[in-house]
Image: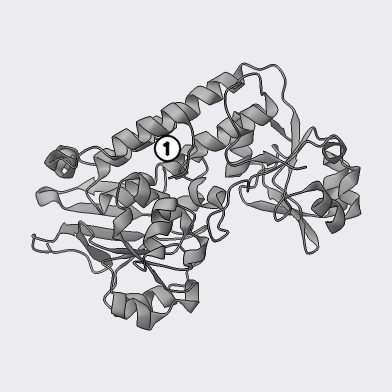
Amino acid sequence: MQKISGVILFLILCWACAPREQTDKNASAVKDSLALDYAMGFKVYYQANNIKMVEVPQPFQGASSGYKYLLVPKDQEIPPHDADVKVIRTPLSSIACTSTTHIPLLDYIQETDKLTGFSTTDFISSEKMRARVDAGKVTELGIDKGINLERLAVLKPDMLMGYALSSDYGQFKKIEELGVPVVINAEYLEKHPLGRAEWIKFMAVFFNREKAADSVFQIIKNNYLATQALAAQTTTRPSVVCGVVYGDAWFLPGGQNYAARILDDAGIHYLWTNDASNGYLELSFEAVYEKANQADLWIGTGPYSTLAEIRAADERYTRFKAFQQKQIYTSDARKGAKGGSEYMELGYLRPDIILNDLVKIAHPELLPEHVLYFHKKLQ
């Protein structure tokens, strides 16, 4: 794992690498449900004989129904259950994943070695997981409807963790017909940054690693809240514009978007904070310029990594105050060995690092020792 932040990373790894005590498997058995602080998108209920019921009530935006998964230890008989409940045998010995955001969830609970299949392995940035890929231990499966069913049938992992953007379950149904259970991860729908991070507990239940996951999450949460409290003390809130033009529209976060929440927690005034949407806005260049041409900061520049690239893409970008004062930052400072974005992979789990970066950018005096991790200033 790449260097992040001295004390915080040390503590997280110490917790995550703790011995796998037998109590870790059964620690939750005395409770009726898994304790969740921020995540709203899943629930875990504990039953007799170490059986767990996992529910994902909203697997995609606007879903009218969800999914239920019955996790049954491999040495236990499968109890009677409703027809719509999918059975998963635990703990998993192997897993295939479809999003890079799933990778750190495995890394941080010390289950890196369980990944045997992934959509596009070049996108993986994690050094631990890349070593596994380079050793030929992870099969490339293809993306979404392009998943290679023959390869998956040969690989036959204990489970495939997917994500859904709509009610189209066609490809997943074909996968399940191969005898590979599919579980939907809906972390991207969480509105609070710590809600997304808490999905590490979702991954953990399939490996009986809830205790380790909770330890990791508590450190991330405490670090995030401490930085948020620090930023709340500032009397200045620099304004910010985000995103760039793709095609005919400038894409930027809605006012209730996850990204807008982190900016607010960092003591930054997001100019679209009063917008009621939680997705992404598609505005004209002119509309963005009218509102944000005097923004103090510009954070998030898509594919552009230098000021010259931004100028070459559209000369009008140079009219922004943030461009003229060279206050433009990309979040893609770190790339994996094959070019994958570490921000896109690790950011969901580590909003505390994102928040520290943003506070360092907007209020450098508050975190004098922090070195930007995901972000860097464009030159």
- Note whether residue 34 is visible: no
Is residue 73 shown above or below 174? above
Please tell me which residue is depicted at 56% across the width and 19% down the height of the picture: 230
Mark 1 = which residue?
A: 38
The local secondary structure at tag 1 comes to loop
Q: Name the foreground residue: 305 vs 144.
A: 305
Left or right: where does residue 141 sit relative to residue 315? left
| Quadrant assignment, res 341 | bottom right
Left or right: where does residue 278 sit relative to residue 205? right
Mark 1 packing: few (<14 Cα in 10 Å), some, or many (20+)?
A: some
Please tell me which residue is depicted at 86% across the width and 45% down the height of the picture: 289
Q: Name the foreground residue: 240 vs 117.
A: 117
Please tell me which residue is depicted at 35% across the width and 37% down the height of the picture: 13
Is residue 243 shown above or below 291? below
**What count of labels does the image hold?**
1
| Quadrant assignment, res 373 | top right
Is residue 112 shown above or below 158? above
Give amino acid for label 1.
Tyr
Which image quadrant: the C terminus?
Answer: top right
Q: Where is residue 220 in the image (x, y as percent from the top left)?
A: 43, 33
Which residue is most to the bottom?
A: 150
| Quadrant assignment, res 40 | top left
Q: Where is residue 82 in the image (x, y as percent from the top left)?
A: 22, 65
Q: Position of residue 41 (x, y in %)?
A: 41, 49
Q: Where is residue 232 in the image (x, y as percent from the top left)?
A: 60, 20
Left or right: where does residue 207 sit relative to residue 278? left
Colour scheme: one colour
Q: Name the foreground residue: 45 vs 138.
A: 138
Which image quadrant: the N terminus?
Answer: top left
- Note whether residue 348 is visible: yes
